[in-house]
Amino acid sequence: MTRTIRILCSLLVALAAAAPAVAQPGSLTLPPYKKVVLKNGMTLLLMEQREVPLVAFSAFLKAGSVSDPAGKEGVASMTAALLRKGTATRSADDFSAQLDFIGGSFGAGAMPDYTSLSAEFMKKDLAKGLELVADALLHPSFPDAEVNKLAAQRVDGIKSAKDRAAGVIGQYFNAYLYGKHPYARPTGGDETSVASITRDDVVKFYQANYTPGATVMAVVGDFSAADMEKQLAAVFAAWPAKSAPPSPVAVTDAPAVKGRRLLLVDKPDSTQTYFRVGNVGIARSNPDRVLIEIVNTLFGGRFTSMINTELRIKSGLTYGANSGFVEWKAKGPFFINSYTSNANTEKALDLTLDVLKRLHEKGISDDDLKSAKAYLKGQFPPDVETADQLAGVLSKLVFDGLDEREINTYYAKIDAATMADVNRAVKQYFPLDNLVFVLVGKASEIEPVAKKYAPVVDRKSISAPGF
């Protein structure tokens, strides 16, 4: 029997006996955890979960793409990806080989407000796993060859993504919606910015932004919290104390767009039009976020939502339509997203706006409210059961300045939502007249249609660098 098969078998046996970590009938409670702040400012969150012999790590650092230097968009994302591509004592191949030998996982990536890191190991391999995590986080070497290879791969990837409108419409939408605001920057960079990133750029970004005072790390799994605290302190106490650096640009709430604006991204070979409609939405700390989640579930957040029912199920104009709110430190975007054939562009956009108008005019019915409440209460528990899920949720909560009440009061907030509450949320957070449109498609066919939705149509070519 191979090592991998032995590991899988032991996990299956453990999982079969495991109980749900947080969900009980009629309630939802985040398991207890211990919070420790090291002398260097690093925050540790320790949660014992003994059902499965695994240990999961999740860390959030204040090192997002909003901190990318101008013209070097994508450096935060590249820095995260390069953490495992060589350290002071390990080459990229050595790191991968040692990680694979113990059947562990390790990954890191950047978002606008943060860089996140995750890892998971069998309990018996914890010492080696912790050694690898610490080495990647504290001692990355960023070899020139790895930086150059990744940059070339990223540039090719961006160019390739533009062959698939679905893969880039979000970048075009954010850039057009936010303009000069930091959230307009593409997290992964563009063809020009990524090509200009050097090892020196990556090293400078790491040295400025990877600090213990800017880091929250959660560890969840089969261990003693007291023992884990000692192990983590022994490893990370050597990380020199340094406060989180100020962002190079102020990240405040962007104002919502007034009136209507439309960007047409010309993709001459496209037989379909991809469209995204929306405006500036809500921040992570918005007190009405549960109410908004209830409404969005009904409007565009599930398969039987209003948008998907009309555009896909009833009319057959598309294979999928959805809506959502992206919650960042400052206000993220609200969007409605779908696609259709060029010939049906006008019909699909008109129907999208009609459904939005119906939401405002008719509001949410009592049956709708009951359905959404039951759906959300049924969908959430499976997302906070495993060690890696709990580690991710816990570290993100504390990083965002929230706490266990976000989980512990979730059901109660859903139950407390009234018809008046959700219909107020419709009027307050789902824009009707003030809308930003981004269409990606064959301009020669759809530009006459695009002019119907905004007084001025801005144009870009998808082959032009950037978004």
Image: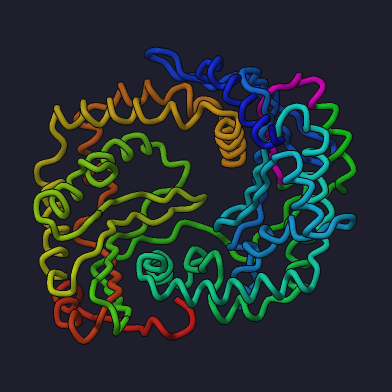
Q: Is residue 455 above or below residue 9?
A: below
**Is residue 142 visible to the viewer in this orientation of the structure?**
yes
- Say which residue appears at 69% left-offset and 62% top-offset: 79
Residue sitting at 88 percent across and 57 percent down?
Answer: 88
Q: Residue at x 33, y 26 (%)?
A: 414
The residue that appears at 66% across and 70% down in the rendered structure is 150
Drawn side of residue 266 relative to residue 116, left or right: left
Q: Position of residue 18 (x, y in %)?
A: 55, 17
Q: Vertically, is 357 above or below 271?
A: above
User: Picture coordinates of residue 416 (x, y %)?
Assistant: 30, 22
User: How many marks can you see?
Assistant: 0
Q: Nearer the viewer, residue 442 or 296?
A: 442
- Can you give x and y, in whole percent of width and height, for residue 149 in the image? 69, 73
Would you place residue 107 above or below residue 304 in this image? below
Quadrant location, the N terminus: top right
Q: Is residue 222 magenta?
A: yes
Q: Kindly give the residue lying farthest to the top in the view shown.
A: 25
The answer to whether residue 187 is left or right of residue 144 is left
Q: Quadrant of residue 188?
A: bottom right
Residue 394 at x, y = what percent? 59, 32
Magenta span includes 261: no
Outermost residue on the front side: it is 1
Coloration mode = rainbow
The range drawn in magenta is 215-228
State whether residue 70 appears in this view: no
Residue 204: image quadrant is bottom right
Relative depth, front residue between 431 and 117: 117
Left or right: 220, with 146 as reference point: left
Which quadrant is home to the C terminus?
Answer: bottom left
Q: Is residue 168 above or below residue 294?
A: below
